[in-house]
Image: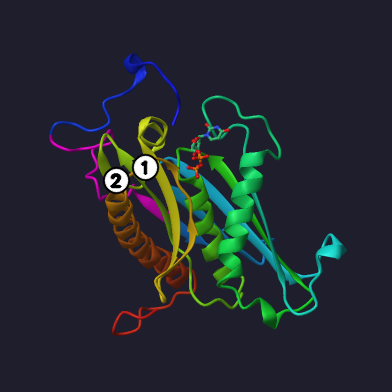
Amino acid sequence: MGNVGAKDVPVLLSPEGLRLDGRRLDELRPIRIEAGTLHQADGSAFVEWGQNKVMAAVYGPREVHPRHLQQNHKAVIQCKYNMAAFAVDERKRPGLDRRSQEISKVIAEAFESVVFAEEFPRTSIDVYIEVLQANAGTRCAGLVAASVALADAGIPMVDLVPAVAVGKVAGQICLDLKKEEDNFGEADLPMALVPQSGRLVLLQMEGHMTEEELGRSLDLGVKGCREIYDRMKAALRERYALTPVAGGAA
Ligand code: UDP
């Protein structure tokens, strides 16, 4: 939500109610998910979502580094989100910054509530997320990629964790914000869902909206997450050449 002069603000919604890229308010950007992209990792996934390109790799359960993080009764989940210097228009300073530390932390916390960590005491499950191209919503794309990579690594979990950002743009609640909508919109609300239980395991918000708008945003985000969930399951089925079970269960 940058502070810019009115002349710089693009028209985010057309008179017909269509967005900059022609999407309706409740429409996702095109998303492609590939499971098992990397050979060296125990599990991996690549996600191309709008103009975002994100790779995730999972290692473990394996020995804990640094050693003092080891927990006797469960695995620790360590997550490293990194955005490449070439991922955005204005070159980003490479390396760890507060934003990537925050994103790594909230993603690790989301997985802590779904992974059966007690099954692997004194080990680490290491999740690496590399953003190669960014256009808003990269923490959600990273979470989706990492979730498929965890499943690809055979880590036992309650469920996959789909994620999407909802926001308020030109006064309207919109699904899956792109960069201009994120920059010039009124609010941005990334969320991640455990579809089986309907529980949210990540919910952040930047900007302002009313309580009623927040309620509608959550409903729209849950609907978006369920669409993404289907794509995640399809990617894993494709990887393992599985056919859908009759009745729709994966
Ligand atoms: N961004 C950027 N430079 C930065 C950080 C972010 O250009 O150093 C862009 C990038 O496109 C990112 C978007 O701003 O996707 C929104 O960033 P935010 O922190 O809201 O996280 P995200 O929406 O990617 O989860």
Residue 47 appears at what percent x and percent y? 48, 53
Kindly identify the residue that appears in the image at 30 percent across and 61 percent down.
223
Q: What range of the chain is rendered magenta? A: 16-32
Q: Is residue 17 magenta?
A: yes
Residues under numbered marks 2 and 1 in contact, where contact means CB atoms less than 8 Å apart = yes
- The one of 38 and 135 positioned closer to us in this rendering: 135
Q: Main secondary structure of the magenta part?
A: loop
Q: Can residue 117 be seen by looking at this rendering?
A: yes
Q: Nearer the viewer, residue 144 or 177?
A: 177
Which SS class for mark 2?
A: strand
**Res. 36 in view:** no
Query: What residue appears at the point 42 percent right and 19 percent down from the top-left corner?
Result: 4
As shown in the figure, which amino acid type bears the numbered disc 1? Leu
Q: Residues within 10 Å of mark 1 (few under 14, many from 20)?
A: many
The kind of residue on which mark 2 rests is: Cys
Q: Quadrant of the C terminus?
A: bottom left
Residue pictured at 52% horizontal, 54% vertical:
46
Q: Which mark is residue 177?
A: 1
Quarter of image, res 150:
bottom right
Residue 74 falls left or right of residue 44: right
| Quarter the N terminus occupies | top left
**Vertical side of 184 occupied by 205: above or below:** below
Residue 141 x/y as whole percent: 48, 51
CB of residue at label 1: within 8 Å of ligand 1?
yes
For residue 141, side relative to residue 18 (left or right) = right
Rounded to the nearest angstrom, the CA distance separating label 2 from label 1 is 7 Å
Q: Which mark is residue 174?
A: 2
Work out which residue is located at the far right of the displayed protein and give it: 67
